[in-house]
Structures are given as structure tokens and as C-alpha cells.
Image (cartoon, rainbow, N blue to C red):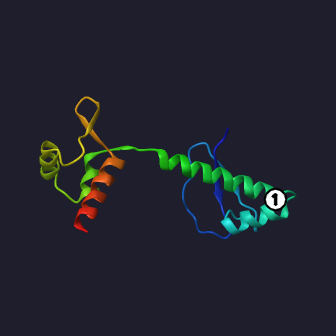
Amino acid sequence: MRKTWTTNPGSNDERLPAKGAVKRRVPTGEASTPASLLARLMRDEGGWDELLRLADMIGRARARADDIDPLIPLSEVLVLSGLSKTKIYGLIKAGAFPAPYKPGGAASRWSRREVLAWRESLRQRRG
């Protein structure tokens, strides 16, 4: 499969293509904006069925993404908590902050869901 490099007619896009890419132009009127894609689906036979199928796929993908609980590094924990590294480790020692997971060696990662739950518990205690 060859890579392609797309330019729109009349654009001043001077980016260079990837090595070995073939330059092609997008035909006028066939831009890939959401409105044009929707219009193209509606013109085609069975466009509504295709649109409903795509909407269903997007809904299912979003539901699966909500079930994922990524392990996040300390840098993201610092942003989510608003605390310093020293304060976080002090709270972990006191049992007041979620403990990190050690997925490999010395690396520490926290459950994003647990950190957000800790933050929500602070809000609830505040009133």
C-alpha cells in the first residue's frame, strides 16, 4: 500500500510528503468536512442506513472507551490532584491517597479512575 499526500485545490499547503508518497489532489467539491460527508451519504442509495450504522458504531466505541481505566504517570497525577510529589507520597503513606501500581520495575502508575474518585471524595467532604 502506497502512502498518498493530499492537497486541496487552491490551498497554500507547502508541507512535504512522506518519503515515497504519491501526490494526489482532492477533487473540488469533495472536501472531507463532516457536512460534505453527510451530504454524500444522503445522496447515495441507502445513505440513511449507512449513517445509522456509523452512529451505532461510534456509540459502541465510546461506551468501550468509558470502560477503560488507564494507568497514568506521576506527572498526570500531579495535574489531576493539584498536589506536589512530596505531598502525594505522604498521603499514600498515611493511607489517604490511592497507592501506585508497579507495572514494571521502578515505574509507578496510578489508576486514573482511583485518582478521580479521590478528588471527588474531597469535593463531597467540602460540601
Residue furthest right in the image: 45
Q: Nearer the viewer, residue 4 or 82?
A: 82
Is 97 located above or below residue 44 in the figure? above
Is 28 located above or below residue 72 in the figure? below
Look at the numbered disc 1 and give the secondary structure of its residue. helix
**Residue 10 in which image quadrant:** bottom right
How many marks are shown on the rendered structure?
Answer: 1
The three-letter code of the residue at mark 1 reads Gly
Across and down, in percent, residue 95 comes to 17, 44
In the image: residue 80, left or right of residue 96? right
Q: Residue at x 19, y 57 (%)?
A: 83
Q: Residue at x 80, y 56 (%)?
A: 49
Q: Give the crowd class for mark 1: few <14, some 14-19, many >=20 residues within 10 Å.
A: some
Across and down, in percent, residue 55 comes to 68, 56
Q: Which residue is mark 1?
A: 47
Q: Residue at x 56, y 44 (%)?
A: 19
In the image: residue 15, left or right of residue 26? left
Across and down, in percent, residue 119 comes to 28, 57
**Residue 102 in which image quadrant:** top left
Residue furthest top in the image: 105
Of the 4 image quadrants, the one containing the N terminus is top right
In the image: residue 69, left or right of residue 120? right
Across and down, in percent, residue 90 comes to 12, 47
Q: Residue at x 27, y 53 (%)?
A: 118
Is 124 located above or below residue 85 in the figure? below
Of the 4 image quadrants, the one containing the C terminus is bottom left
